[in-house]
């Protein structure tokens, strides 16, 4: 569930101060996709600030428990009067007042539940914010791998092309090749050099951006490599759709919204229930210390607030020294205080129905999108396999061109073009492998999986393989 993911992020960020001293050790330690995502989350100052603000709001919600306990007020008063005519007066009053909520029909509990749900939804949004930061780091990680791999291919190709160009220059000097072929070969080599310079520039900028996202001064060694021979291990459509329905972050947010609307509907349904409060006071009074008079009283307030009638009933009884007994009864009523509030229940019901319809649509949309993303993964893997076959065919053609060059059937320029074709096919295979990684990560996001967990989930979905030696029929081995 996203809640589990959110609390995992809370633990990670709360340990940030401890990890700051450890992060510097990543400079010489290879990092995987998952570790890069965690480092990017820990290095985000905005995210840390949001988590701290969330923690403050949660602490404030805990202090809201105070509303369940009595409210006590202390009062002290001295009233001295000096008169030119008549007797001076010196009156001293000290009192303690207590007010306790007995029952409000669950209004206070519902209010706290709604606040708790708001905090939970805010936590889910923070988790999604952390996911976005992690995804940005993973995207840059893949870009760095792509640039490095393609650059290595280009540099190896440049070395081979330079060697072929030197041979072609000798052939032109000996009259065995045309100067036009040499000019075209030089142009091809120059274009390859330009590609290498562009790749190096893009690589330096991407590595700097990646190091900034990780909060490091120097980019560490990357443990992940681009393996064009790696085949995709994908789960079944049914298992993927089922897991997406359970753990997709967007659906989880809709579920929280439905729970919130249900609580609001229940609160609107119970709005007619009266509130009962107990109050009491105790006081001391007199002209001089020690105070000689006392009084106390205990009472009940019943408050009924509805759209058509608002009524407050109060009863109080007590005792005043020396032996005086007191009692009071009061009732205040107001007709039609807020008739529009009678529609509150209907509005809450409509809001709940709307959220439920949104969830159903989002659930169906998520299932379809999961199936489409799974198809994209399969197509990306198919593209990778076709790219490998293209490399094999281009390599065979290059070998044949070498034989034809030896037989004098083609020029060295044709051989260089065949080699450039092989290089382009290798680059296409690398791009296909990167596309497969991106498609797999999109599927992992839909299933709320960490980077690299898709293959683990796919293995769990595979049917068990029967061992021929342990197979039996009718109880007979």
Image (cartoon, rainbow, N blue to C red):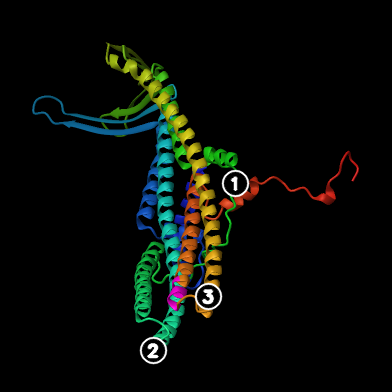
Q: Foreground: 331 or 468?
A: 468
Q: Residue furthest right?
A: 476
Nearest to N terminus: mark 2 or mark 1: 2
Above or below residue 411? Residue 235 is: above
The span picked out in magenta is 412-417
Q: Residues within 10 Å of mark 3 (few under 14, many from 20)?
A: some
Disc 3 marks which residue? Answer: 404
Give percent across and percent down for residue 433.
50, 59
Q: Foreground: 274 or 140?
A: 140
Above or below residue 324? Residue 257 is: below
Give percent across and percent down for residue 295.
35, 23
Give percent across and percent down for residue 301.
37, 18
**Mark toward the viewer: 3 or 1:** 3
Nearest to N terminus: mark 3 or mark 2: 2
Q: Is residue 364 left or right of residue 76?
A: right
Q: Are marks 3 and 1 in contact (CB under 8 Å)?
A: no
Disc 1 marks which residue? Answer: 235
Dot 2 lies on which element? helix
Disc 2 marks which residue? Answer: 173
**Mark toward the viewer: 2 or 1:** 2
Give percent across and percent down for residue 302.
38, 17
Q: How crowded is mark 1: few (under 14 residues within 10 Å), some or many (20 or more)?
A: some
Q: In this view, does 451 lie to the left or right of 352?
A: right
Q: Residue furthest left?
A: 84
Q: Foreground: 96 or 217?
A: 217
Above or below residue 204? Residue 163 is: below
């Amino acid at each position: 569930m996203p809640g589990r993911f959110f609390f995992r992020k809370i633990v990670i960020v709360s340990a940030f101060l401890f990890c700051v001293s450890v992060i510097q050790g990543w400079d010489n330690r290879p990092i995987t996709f998952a570790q890069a995502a965690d480092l990017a989350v820990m290095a985000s100052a905005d995210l840390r600030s949001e988590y701290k603000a969330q923690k403050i709001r949660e602490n404030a919600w805990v202090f809201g428990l105070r509303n369940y306990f009595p409210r006590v007020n202390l009062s002290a008063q001295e009233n001295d009067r000096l008169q030119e005519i008549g007797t001076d007066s010196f009156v001293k009053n000290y009192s303690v007042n207590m007010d306790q909520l007995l029952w409000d029909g669950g209004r206070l509990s519902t209010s706290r539940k709604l606040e708790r749900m708001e905090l939970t939804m805010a936590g889910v949004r923070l988790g999604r914010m952390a996911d976005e930061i992690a995804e940005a780091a993973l995207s840059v990680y893949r870009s760095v791998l792509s640039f490095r791999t393609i650059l290595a291919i280009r540099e190896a190709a440049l070395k081979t092309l330079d060697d072929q160009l030197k041979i072609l220059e000798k052939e032109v000097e000996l009259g065995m090749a045309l100067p036009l072929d040499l000019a075209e070969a030089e142009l091809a080599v120059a274009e390859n050099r330009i590609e290498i310079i562009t790749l190096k520039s893009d690589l330096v900028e991407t590595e700097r951006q990646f190091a900034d996202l990780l909060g490091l001064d120097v980019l560490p060694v990357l443990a992940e490599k681009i393996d064009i021979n790696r085949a995709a291990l994908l789960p079944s459509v049914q298992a993927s759709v089922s897991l997406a329905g359970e753990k997709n972050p967007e659906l989880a947010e809709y579920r929280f919204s439905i729970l919130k609307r249900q609580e609001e509907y229940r609160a609107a349904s119970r709005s007619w229930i009266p509130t009962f409060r107990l109050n009491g006071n105790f006081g001391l009074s007199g002209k001089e210390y020690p105070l000689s008079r006392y009084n106390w009283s205990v009472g009940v307030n019943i408050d009924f607030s509805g759209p058509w009638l608002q009524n407050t009933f109060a009863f109080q009884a007590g005792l005043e020294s020396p032996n005086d007994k007191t009692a009071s009864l009061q009732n205040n009523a107001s007709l039609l205080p807020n008739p529009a509030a009678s529609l509150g229940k209907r509005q809450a019901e409509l809001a709940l129905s709307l959220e439920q319809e949104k969830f159903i649509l989002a659930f169906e949309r998520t299932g379809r999108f999961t199936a489409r993303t799974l198809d994209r993964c399969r197509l990306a893997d198919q593209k990778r396999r076709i790219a490998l076959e293209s490399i094999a065919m281009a390599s065979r053609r290059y070998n044949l061109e070498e034989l034809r060059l030896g037989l004098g059937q083609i020029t060295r320029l044709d051989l260089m073009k065949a080699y450039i074709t092989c290089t382009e096919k290798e680059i296409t295979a690398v791009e296909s492998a990167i596309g497969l990684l991106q498609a797999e990560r999109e599927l992992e996001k839909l299933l709320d999986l960490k980077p690299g967990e898709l293959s683990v989930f796919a293995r769990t979905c595979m049917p068990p393989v029967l061992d021929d030696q342990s197979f039996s029929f009718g109880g007979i081995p």
